[in-house]
Structure formats: C-alpha cells, structure tokens
Image: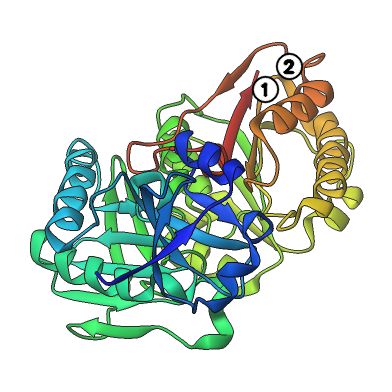
Amino acid sequence: MKTRRYQVKKEVETILKQGHPWIFKSHLSTAANIFNTGDCLALVNSANEIIAYGLFEKDSLIAIRVIKYGKTPPDAEWFKNKLKKSLLKRENIKNYTEGYRALHGENDGFPGVVFDVYGKTGVLQTYVPSVDPLGRFVANVLRNELHLETVVWKAPSRRKKEGVTRILYGYQPKLQLIREGKLKVAVDVGEGQKSGTFLDLRGLRKFLSLQNLKGKRVLNLFSYTGTLGLAAEVAGATEIWNVDISKGALKFSETHHSLDKKKYRFIDADVFNWIETLPPFEKFDVIIVDPPSMASEAKQVPVALKAYARIYKRVLPHLKSKGMMIVCCCTSRISRKQFTEVAKKSLISTLPKMKSLPPEDDHPVGFPQGDYLKMLVFV
C-alpha cells in the first residue's frame, strides 16, 4: 500500500497512544490540505518516527481513520490475518444463528467497513469513500473464507445519494429466513435498515424468547419489522401490539414475523403522538421502547434525552404491576452513562431492578464511540 508521510501534532500523538481510531479535522495542521480522499498516510511523530497508518477523508469531520498502529506498513497478508482473527471471535455465534456480523468496523480494526452474513450471502457497507477500496478487499477475502455465493454492496443511509445496492459477486439475493435460536428471522437482504435487519438486537431477541410470557400482553413501540414481537410470541405472549410509523415495516412484520396473526395488532402511527391517545385502561405486562437514533449530531443530544424521558413517563402508567419495561438507545452520541441516568430517573422508583444486556460477540466495543447500542431491562 503506497503511503504519504504526515507529521501529527502532539495532541494527536496522545490520541494514537490511547488506541483511538479517529483523528478529527480540528486536530490537523494546514499541511494536510495537500492530501486527497483515500490517501494512506504514514503518521509520524515529532521525532519523525512512524507511529501509525491511516486513511484520509477530505470532506469529513473525521479526517483520518487509523488502520494500523506501529512502524510496519499494512499489506494484504496483514489484513487477511486480521480478518481471520475477527472471524474466530464469531465461531460460537454460528452455533446459534446463520445471520451475524463478520466485521464490525472500527471495533474490529477496520474503520468504516461493516460486513454482515446471512447464510450464503454477504452484505458489505462502507461508510465513507476513503475506505471503499479496503471494503472491496474485505468483501473478496470474506467471500472466499466463508464460501459465500453472493456478496452485495449496500450504501448506508448516510451515503444513499451516492448510489444503490450493487452486486459484487453472485446474483440478486432473495428474501431469506435466518435461524436465530428459537426464531426464524426474515431478511430482505440489502434492503431496509442496516444490511437487511437489526443483527445488533439479537441479544434482546434472545432475552425475550427465553422469558416466560405465557398469557402476557406486550406493547412493542417503534416495532419496525416486528422481530422483538416475534420473540415475545415465541416466549408465550398471547397479545402483541406492534406500533410503528412505517406501513411497509408493519406489513413485513405481519407477513413474516407473526406466527399467529390473531395475537397481533399492527398500528401505523407516530409513536410519540399515538401514546398520548392510548386509553388509561390499556395495560401491558411488557413494554418495549426502542426508538430510532434521535441524535446524529452532538447538539441534538439534549433534545433526544428529553424525548426519552417524556415517552417513559407517558408509557409507564400502562405497565401492569410486576411488569417489565425494556428501553433501548442506538446512538453513540448519547453515552451509556447519560442514557442510563435518564432511564433510571424515569423508571427506577417504580421498577427498582435494572439489568443491562451486553452486546453480542459479533458487535464488540473497541472504543467509546463504538458503544452505540444500549439495552436496559427494568422490573
């Protein structure tokens, strides 16, 4: 890999010593203006020693994404060995499911590159142009290592304007049913949110499916395609309300994620408005609140935290005595501490016991901003 040298400031040296994978634009000197998106930079310290290598992104707040620490430059063999180490961490997951994240971006040492697997199909996502070549390399290696028949390249939501899903290898994938413990999860590969479904919620689906919900009523807010409702049904729930603003997601839920449709109500509504109209007598044994990311920028965090507190306060009266409330947050902009404090302040006086569900092995947390998904259970 051809590299260009760039001497970093003292503060960046400190950041690199801490193992953080991002160097922000504000940390760079004007000397960086000569570089182009995709350039591989050999980062040197004040003693002119190479301390790391990173990919440059010209039009991004994150200007350099670190791909390797140390003096030795990365090569194809180094990347392959690193990929194999990531795959080894997923071995136990394969006994439970055919759908998993083979590569989790920065948390696995491949900044901006995500690769999900659904049976014999892989889905590549690259979050900025500078990592596109690395993503293509990853897709080729993983196709061979995992004996995949099809690999598609899907633009994440932040890059939708740049293009649509492309087939790298194989053929146009069809809807797949993926085994996940007791569940069969339908995946419209390369479509919808993420790479086709929310693999990161597997731990919560597993938790719900193992509960004794026989005869229980479940309110599933921001239900999307209803996989959490399905987990509750498998656990014995006899009535499940899926509420979401997307008619398409609810239709998908009804078609693919409801074993007995008589147990379900599918409600097309803005949850924040709908919850205000829910009659006081409607009570549930389990309430799930899993809203989409409401803080893509730091300035949105206070508003998002207030929205969490507001909806918790509104839905809590609809929880039966000795009920369970599950709340989630899916943005790294809101820290685990901030989210937990808001949830506890809203719920702990009524629901004194709190449990935090850990991330699955295919969603490791390697740095603070990588801790984006928080799942709390209150009883």
Query: Residue 67: where, in percent of width, then height?
Result: 36, 55
Query: Residue 223: where, in percent of width, then height?
Result: 61, 54
Q: Residues within 10 Å of mark 2 (few under 14, many from 20)?
A: some
Q: Is residue 161 left or right of residue 106?
A: right
Q: Is residue 332 above or below residue 313?
A: below
* Residue at position x 39%, y 74% in the image: 190
Query: Residue 231: where, in percent of width, then height?
Result: 45, 42
Question: Mark 1 = which residue?
Answer: 323
Question: Mark 2 = which residue?
Answer: 351
Q: CA distance from mark 2 to mark 1?
A: 8 Å
Callout 2 touching callout 1 (CB < 8 Å): yes
* Residue at position x 60%, y 46% in the image: 240
Q: Is residue 375 above or below residue 123?
A: above
Type of residue at label 2?
Leu
* Residue at position x 42%, y 55% in the image: 43
Q: Is residue 42 left or right of residue 90?
A: right
Nearest the viewer among 306 and 325 is: 306
